[in-house]
Image (cartoon, helix red, strand yellow):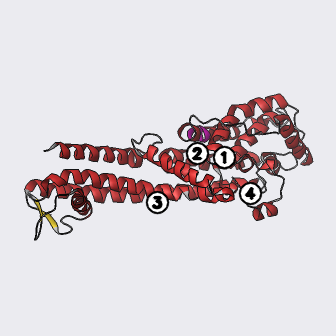
Amino acid sequence: MTFEQMGGAALMALFLADIFLTVLYARAGTGLLAPHWNRCVWLMVSGVAKMAGRYRSAVLSFAGPLIVIALIAFWALGLTLAAAFIVRPELGTTIRPSSGETPTDLVTALLVAGNSLSIVGGGDYAPHSSGTRLLFLINSFIGASVLSLVLSYLVQVYSALHERNAFALTIDLMTGETGDAAKMLTRLSQGGDFSDAISTLDNLVRPLAMIKEAHHFYPLLFYFRFNDPRYAVTRFVFILLDLATLIETGLDPKRHRAFICPSPVDALHRCAALLLETLDQHLAAGNRATALTGTRPCEERYETAAATLRAAGIEPLLNHRSYADRRGEWEPSLARVGQALGYTVEESDCRQRAAPPTQRRATRHIV
């Protein structure tokens, strides 16, 4: 075995290990090459989006599908190049065409390697020794296995994406399409009665937990973002964390003990925080971003939420400091993730704009 063939075998092992860790081991950040490749493609798309002006959000919405295509091409090219390094020294001796001379250049080796990874004995070139026949058989097995694994992986990614979008739309509808956690809280109550709200929140915990785990299993989900901000991960995470914060700091613990104390509120808060932690750790690590509050202090936001609760017959506690402290626990992470995904403050916190739902649908959202 030549040094070229040993290098090809090492390169083949590297790409197979990357595919194994990305597709089969399926935990965010465990891939050897794919996470860095995906990040590079995202940065390139982001760079193009910056030059697109008001169409930046639309350009970024193509990032997820483009990263999928780029990742498949990256793996295919890597495996083909590795096989070509193994094949090239055998050209003209144990690997020959049916007739004519045998070119020994890298392009020919890539052609033979690509054929051997797809179909045994495919093309004009055929193995003429036991070793090269075994090599073609192994290459064929690798090619077929990787193809089936990648196709299955992509089906699961898009299935998880569908579930995430459905959940995001559910949360948006529960806020009356306002993106306001206070509005969602009032819609959970019936004139201050939260007896039925416990089961409603409990029903949200499981799909949210599935979405959190999907982002750990399929890191490609990080890069799927849509033009419509109602599907933004940062938006529904913001709503749920703000909802839990309002429940914990805005409701009277004596009057609403049955609603505040049960596990669904804590579970929803913790699960949303874990999803945010996953995104922050693997997508926005090292980024610095300003808080989502922008020019509006937490006191003003709390007063707005309190006014919404009063209008629905719920008397809130005036606990501005506690509300601000609780928001400070998760708001910086949410700001970093939103910035990394190219979302504006308004797209994460829709209370920044006061347009009604009908007007929002007719307005272009600029990132």
Residue topped by disc 2: 209
Give the Cα distance between marks 1 and 2.
Answer: 16 Å
Circles 3, 2 touching at the beta carbon (< 8 Å): no
Residue topped by disc 4: 173
Magenta residues, start to end: 274-278
Point 18% across, 54% down: residue: 87
Percent coordinates x, y for residue 169 in the rendering: 68, 57
Q: Main secondary structure of the magenta part?
A: helix
The CA distance from mark 3 to mark 2 is: 20 Å
Residue 309 drawn at (x, y percent): 87, 44
* First in sequence: mark 1 vs mark 3: 3
Q: Looking at the image, which is closer to me, 268 or 303? A: 303
Kind of residue at disc 3: Val
Left or right of 158: which side holds 110? Answer: left
Q: Mark 2 is on which residue type?
A: Ala
Mark 1 or mark 2, earlier in chain:
2
Q: Residue at x 88, y 39 (%)?
A: 303
Q: Which mark is residue 234?
A: 1
Q: Secondary structure at mark 4?
A: helix
In the rendered structure, does residue 358 fall within the stretch colored magenta?
Answer: no
Residue 154 versus residue 2 in the image, above or below: below
CB within 8 Å, label 4 to label 3 = no
Counting residues from the start of the chain, the first of labels 3 and 2 encountered is 3
C-alpha separation, residue under disc 4 versus residue under disc 1: 16 Å
Q: Categorize mark 4 by other alpha carbons within 10 Å: few (<14), some (14-19), many (20+).
A: some
The residue labelled by disc 3 is 155
